[in-house]
Image: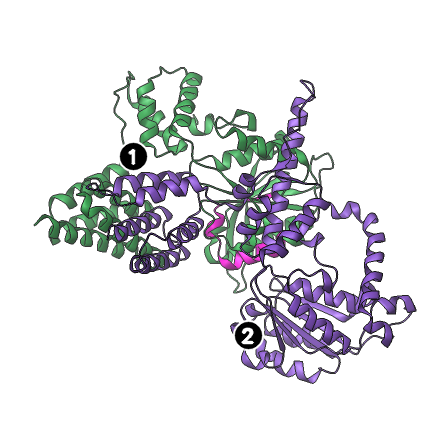
Chain colours: A purple, B green
């Protein structure tokens, strides 16, 4: 077992060959599945763009031991995927259920659960793998410990976290913990110091692009030029969001295609569907709720200082239309911010003041203030600052 | 006799008059069999609900129009009893969890679980899943939204959600990324004009193109409001011409009067008078935000350009306070006082 345990390559090959055979029988059930689940990385090597982390993990694997782990980083960077892939390659399907306990934020996770469920699982003796043949063991090393995955650990209460402290140490012989969270500062210090930390950095564009391209190819999607770039931009480093957008767009495009075919069936079949079913940049932006550049342009235009006349009328017309068109205020604030702050022609001293206005507006929107008034106030203030 | 808004409400996707590309999309989604969770957002009076009802009909056929109203009682963890109304048909269910305030999580968890765990009873139904329409989704508490998140993933074979919201700002990101966002923009003024024309034709009323245009402008791109105004004009006047006056709603007239008073006399005495008017509005259940917004725009229209940004600034400021605070009248009054102060310094 030891020799195959070190041989990562052989194991990976074995995994991929077995999963390929299974994939065909599962075809039907995966059709309705979200792509995020469908294309979740199966092995550590598949995890996109976290070279540093995966390398360290593979090395700890070879040492046939695992520390307690704390994964942190922005959403959609592959934290959960990494630990799941690791767990799968460690234990394989036969032992997965008995060796892994996965709890995430939607499960009840107060102090009671930690005392009860987590502790019981951590305390339970290991079930010995019986009836596993050598081939299975060749693929999966099955080390003698269990793993408890606490997903979104930063939403656990302080009490629940402190209840974990002793549990982690007492049963460390047979149980490893893996905490996954977005904000490492929300994890209490005693817990954090018991874990080795792995930071997941925001995905760079090329890695995310390759993954999206792959999915598009597997799903037979027709993409317009620039769609992948738009997806990455709208996803803001969050691959999960980008994939969800892609799936929604594909559904719409596919649906439009089907609808068009039905309608055209008796009329003419000649060129129906030739330009249907293509995912356009615009459709992605619409799904992501991105405000078109032209609308922003007109708003920025209205805010520019004009000689004599006040900016009020122009700005208020544009804002009223914007609100009536149903654009989300948070989205607007985000996009306007990027637009204004990266404009070179605005002097730094003005930018300083503008950013202050943005900060206050964001707070107000979070508190649930009226969008129309807030946006109007924000834009008027910016216009005023631009006037100097 | 039903109001025009209800009587002429389009019942199917084909009957919708504006945003044809959106209707097409909804139709093809309904026909594709793989219907996603939807988050429909847009300003009020843009036709969100109408579109959703029409889509439901497209999905399940006319059965969705046979609705009944249930009153259910839920028990919270602290043993408080909550009464909750549910509008449902065989295929779908419509709830407004914001009605029960902070306890919306209890309702969402219990109700949705119950729906999701029972399969569609009617075997001849077109779809295997049931649909739950959640009104005012942007008023759901964070807790309730977090509870939704799990439900959406876990029970997706039996359950589809349609969330209706005025804005996506208050919807947490995990929900936004799990739903297909559908934006329903308000109808343009031309759209409203044509809708009014159709309404007039159906009712056999004389048409006045100029009046339609004015109503469209006055309604602020809100079709429901436009139709109500339209009906009230025809109810009040014998002869309809382009110049027929558009009577504003009572509360708006009252706010107009208030605005006049504020501008005319800036003194503590006048503030006291304004206060009674504001109370009057509030006791008639006009939402404070509406009062403040309407008042602001009435005032802004009458002051000098240089003052406008300042007025808007304070209006936004006090509107925020209304949302945070507990007693509305303080903040409304504070705004009026602030406005008087600004105006006074400017005039003198």
Does residue B149 belong to the magenta stretch? yes
Residue A329 spot, x, y in % from top left:
41, 49
Of circles 2 and 1, which is in front? 2
Which residue is most to the front? A345
Q: Is residue B171 visible?
A: yes
Q: Quadrant of the N terminus of chain B?
A: top left
Does residue A345 belong to the magenta stretch? no
Q: Quadrant of residue A314?
A: top left
Q: Is residue B65 visible?
A: no
Q: Say whether residue B168 is left or right of residue B348.
A: right
Q: Which numbered tag is attached to residue B249?
A: 1
- Out of A134 and A344, give the one closest to the viewer: A344
| Mark 2 burial class by Cα count in 10 Å: few <14, some 14-19, many 20+ | many
- Magenta: predominant secondary structure element? helix
Q: Which numbered tag is attached to residue A322?
A: none
Whole-angstrom CA distance, mark 2 to mark 1, is 55 Å
Query: Which chain letter matches label 2?
Result: A
Query: Which chain letter matches label 1?
Result: B
Q: Is B30 above or below relative to A351?
A: above
Would you say the residues marked 2 and 1 are in contact, meaning their CB atoms lie under 8 Å apart?
no
Residue drawn at x 57%, y 48% as measured from the top left: A229
Q: Circle 2 sits in a helix, a strand or a loop, which is it?
A: loop
Q: Quadrant of residue A153?
A: bottom right
- Out of A337 and B59, give the one closest to the viewer: A337
* Residue range of the region highlighted in magenta in the rendering: B132-152
Residue A332 spot, x, y in % from top left:
42, 48
Residue at which label 2 appears = A187
């Amino acid at each position: 077992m030891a020799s195959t345990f070190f041989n990562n390559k052989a194991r990976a090959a074995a995994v991929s060959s077995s999963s390929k055979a299974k994939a065909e029988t599962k075809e039907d059930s995966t059709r309705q599945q979200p792509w995020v689940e469908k294309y979740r990385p199966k092995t550590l090597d598949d995890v996109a763009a976290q070279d540093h982390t995966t390398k360290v993990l593979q090395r700890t694997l070879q040492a046939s031991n695992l520390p307690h782990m704390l994964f942190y980083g922005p959403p959609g960077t592959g934290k959960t995927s990494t630990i799941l892939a690791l767990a799968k390659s460690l234990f394989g399907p036969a032992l997965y259920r008995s060796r892994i306990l996965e709890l995430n934020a939607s499960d009840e996770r107060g102090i009671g659960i930690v005392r009860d469920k987590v502790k019981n699982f951590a305390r339970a003796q290991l079930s010995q793998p019986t009836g596993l043949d050598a081939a299975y063991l060749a693929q999966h090393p099955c080390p003698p410990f269990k793993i408890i995955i606490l997903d979104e650990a930063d939403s656990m209460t302080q009490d629940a976290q402190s209840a974990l402290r002793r549990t982690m140490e007492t049963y460390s012989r047979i149980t490893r913990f893996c905490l996954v969270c977005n904000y490492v500062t929300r994890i209490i210090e005693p817990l954090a110091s018991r874990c080795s930390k792995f930071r997941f950095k925001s995905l760079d564009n090329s890695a995310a692009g390759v993954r999206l391209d792959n999915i598009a190819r597997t799903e037979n999607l027709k993409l317009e030029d620039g769609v992948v770039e738009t997806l990455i931009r709208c996803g803001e480093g969050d691959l999960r969001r980008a994939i969800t957008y892609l799936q929604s767009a594909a559904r719409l495009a596919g649906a439009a295609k089907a609808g068009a075919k039905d309608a055209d069936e008796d009329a003419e079949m000649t060129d129906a569907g030739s330009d249907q079913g293509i995912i356009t940049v615009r459709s992605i932006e619409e799904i992501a709720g991105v405000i078109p550049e032209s609308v922003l342009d007109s708003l920025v235009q209205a805010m520019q200082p004009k000689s004599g006349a006040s900016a009020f009328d122009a700005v208020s017309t544009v804002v009223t239309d914007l609100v009536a068109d149903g654009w989300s205020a948070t989205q607007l604030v985000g996009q306007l911010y990027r637009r204004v702050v990266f404009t070179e022609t605005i002097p730094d001293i003005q930018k300083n003041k503008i950013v202050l206005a943005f900060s206050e507006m964001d707070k107000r929107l979070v508190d649930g203030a009226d969008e129309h008034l807030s946006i109007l106030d924000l834009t008027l203030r910016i216009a005023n600052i631009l006037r100097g | 006799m039903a109001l025009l808004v209800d009587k002429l409400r389009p019942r199917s996707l084909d009957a919708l008059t504006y945003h044809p590309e959106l209707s097409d999309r909804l139709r093809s989604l309904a026909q594709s069999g793989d219907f996603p969770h939807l988050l429909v957002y847009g300003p009020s009076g843009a036709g969100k609900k109408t579109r959703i009802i029409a889509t439901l009909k497209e999905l399940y056929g006319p059965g969705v129009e046979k609705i009944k109203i249930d009153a259910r009682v839920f028990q919270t963890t602290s043993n408080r009893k909550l009464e909750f109304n549910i509008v449902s048909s065989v295929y779908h269910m419509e709830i407004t969890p914001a009605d029960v305030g902070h306890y919306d999580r209890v309702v969402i968890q219990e109700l949705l679980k119950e729906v999701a765990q029972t399969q569609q009873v009617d075997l001849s139904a077109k779809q295997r899943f049931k649909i739950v329409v959640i009104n005012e989704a942007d008023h759901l508490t964070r807790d309730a939204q977090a509870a939704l998140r799990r439900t959406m993933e876990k029970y997706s074979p039996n359950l589809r959600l349609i969330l209706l919201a005025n804005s996506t700002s208050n919807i947490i990101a995990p929900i936004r990324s799990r739903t297909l966002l559908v934006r329903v923009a308000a109808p343009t003024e031309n759209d409203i004009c044509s809708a009014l024309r159709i309404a007039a034709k159906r009712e056999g009323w004389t048409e006045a193109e100029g009046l339609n245009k004015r109503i469209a402008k006055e309604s602020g791109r809100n079709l429901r409001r436009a139709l109500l105004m339209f009906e009230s004009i025809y109810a009040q006047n014998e002869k309809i011409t382009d110049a027929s006056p558009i009577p504003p709603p009572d509360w708006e007239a009252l706010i107009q009067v208030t605005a006049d008073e504020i501008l005319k006399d800036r003194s503590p005495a006048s503030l006291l008078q304004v206060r009674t008017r504001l109370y009057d509005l509030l006791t008639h259940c006009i939402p404070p935000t509406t009062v403040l917004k309407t008042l602001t725009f009435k005032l802004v229209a009458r002051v000098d350009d240089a003052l406008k940004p300042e007025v808007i600034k304070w209006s936004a400021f006090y509107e925020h306070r209304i949302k945070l605070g507990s007693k509305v009248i303080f903040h409304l009054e504070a705004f009026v006082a602030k406005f008087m102060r600004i105006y006074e310094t400017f005039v003198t």
